[in-house]
Image (cartoon, rainbow, N blue to C red):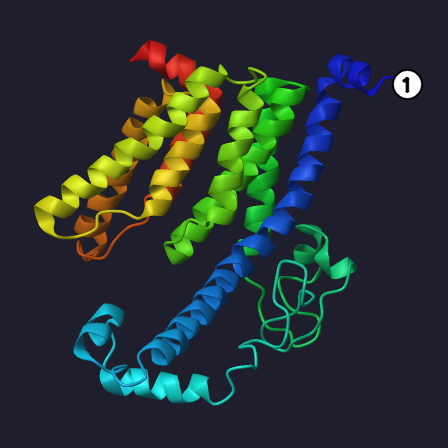
């Protein structure tokens, strides 16, 4: 039986399959959203300790000089404390227990109860457990089922727009990557290279077959996407002495440019800037948000990119 023929003649079957897949992927995205920032911070900590240790070895008589302290942005007392703690056993790794996307097994953050297969069914387990851990009865964050549901809803919208085919398959990958990156940036103000860079190359690969745009427009889109925000960053920094955004934003827009082509970059910037300005001004006026506290720009870029993926040509023609 030809599965392509089934999905072509029965579009609702695509929606069902994609929706279920979205729930499963949403459950995995919860793991990525929680663990990837921790993995990154652990790696940075190891690198910082290694930097301190190497600097101490290379400058044993001048390790605590003023220039080095200013470079690290820490007080002499703090650095001495760190160096004593890390130089006692330099051969022992910082973390003996593995921590990645697969290990350790998912568990309750309150009591450590390992989550079973039946307790890990997207949305259904949350409802069955009434939003509480079966062991300690502490509340489970509503974030988990919401992300699973959002993953499924976005997947169904993508299926409705593209229909069954390669465009659907890769658009789903992009959608789920944007969802994970947005929430990580919202929570931690981080846009992981582990997400943006592989997806940038995947976008170029897809468009080498002309899936969403031509390879030439894809290459130009990646370059333009990066350079536009890079230029804005340096103009703002030269004018104010402050950093207006992070390098992750450059890479995210470059990634979107690689998927959608350079013509989509102005529309993405317009939508994301408008949405960011409206939300930022509203937070300042209505909730007293400190204007000096940065607001992550990644979620707005990702949302604008996703909108452009589906309706970019229509919006461009309208404007």
Residue 238 spot, x, y in % from top left:
11, 45
Residue designated by label 1: 1
**Residue 192 rendering spot, x and y as whole percentages:** 46, 50
**Quadrant assignment for the N terminus:** top right
The image position of residue 182, as x and y in percent, is 44, 45
Nearer the observer, 198 or 298: 198
Decide which of 43, 66 is in the foreground and name it: 66
- Outermost residue to the left: 239
Q: Quadrant of residue 227?
A: top left
Query: Which SS class for mark 1?
Result: loop
Q: Position of residue 160 (x, y in %)?
A: 60, 21
Residue drawn at the location 39% of the way across and 24% of the way down: 221
Residue 307 can be seen, yes or no: no
Residue drawn at the location 36% of the way across and 54% of the way down = 189
Q: Nearer the viewer, residue 7 or 236?
A: 236
Q: Which residue extends farthest top?
A: 317
């Amino acid at each position: 039986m030809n599965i392509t023929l089934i999905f072509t003649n029965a579009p609702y079957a695509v929606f069902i399959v994609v929706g279920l897949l979205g729930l499963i992927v949403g459950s995995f995205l919860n793991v990525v959203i929680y663990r990837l920032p921790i993995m990154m911070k652990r790696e940075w900590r190891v690198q910082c300790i290694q930097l301190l240790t190497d600097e101490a070895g290379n400058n044993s008589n001048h390790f605590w000089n003023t220039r080095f302290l200013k470079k690290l942005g820490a007080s002499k007392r703090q650095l001495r404390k760190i160096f004593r703690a890390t130089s006692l056993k330099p051969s022992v790794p910082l973390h003996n227990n593995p921590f990645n996307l697969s290990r350790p097994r998912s568990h309750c953050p309150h009591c450590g109860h390992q989550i079973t297969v039946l307790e890990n069914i997207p949305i259904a387990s949350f409802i069955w457990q009434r939003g509480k851990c079966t062991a300690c009865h502490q509340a489970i964050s509503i974030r988990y089922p919401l992300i699973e549901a959002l993953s499924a809803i976005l997947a169904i919208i993508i299926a409705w727009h593209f229909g069954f085919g390669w465009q659907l398959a890769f658009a789903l990958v992009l959608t789920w990557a944007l969802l994970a990156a947005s929430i990580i940036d919202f929570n931690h103000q981080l846009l992981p290279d582990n997400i943006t860079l592989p997806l940038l190359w995947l976008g170029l690969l897809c468009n080498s077959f002309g899936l969403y745009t031509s390879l030439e427009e894809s290459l130009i889109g990646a370059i333009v996407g990066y350079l536009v925000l890079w230029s804005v960053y340096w103009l703002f920094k030269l004018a104010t002495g402050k950093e207006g955004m992070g390098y992750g934003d450059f890479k995210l827009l470059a990634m979107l440019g690689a998927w959608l082509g350079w013509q989509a970059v102005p529309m993405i910037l317009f939508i994301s800037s408008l949405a960011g300005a409206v939300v930022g001004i509203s937070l300042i006026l209505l909730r007293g948000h400190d204007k000096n506290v940065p607001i992550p720009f990644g979620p707005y870029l990702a949302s604008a990119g996703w909108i452009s993926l589906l309706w970019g040509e229509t919006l461009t023609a309208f404007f």
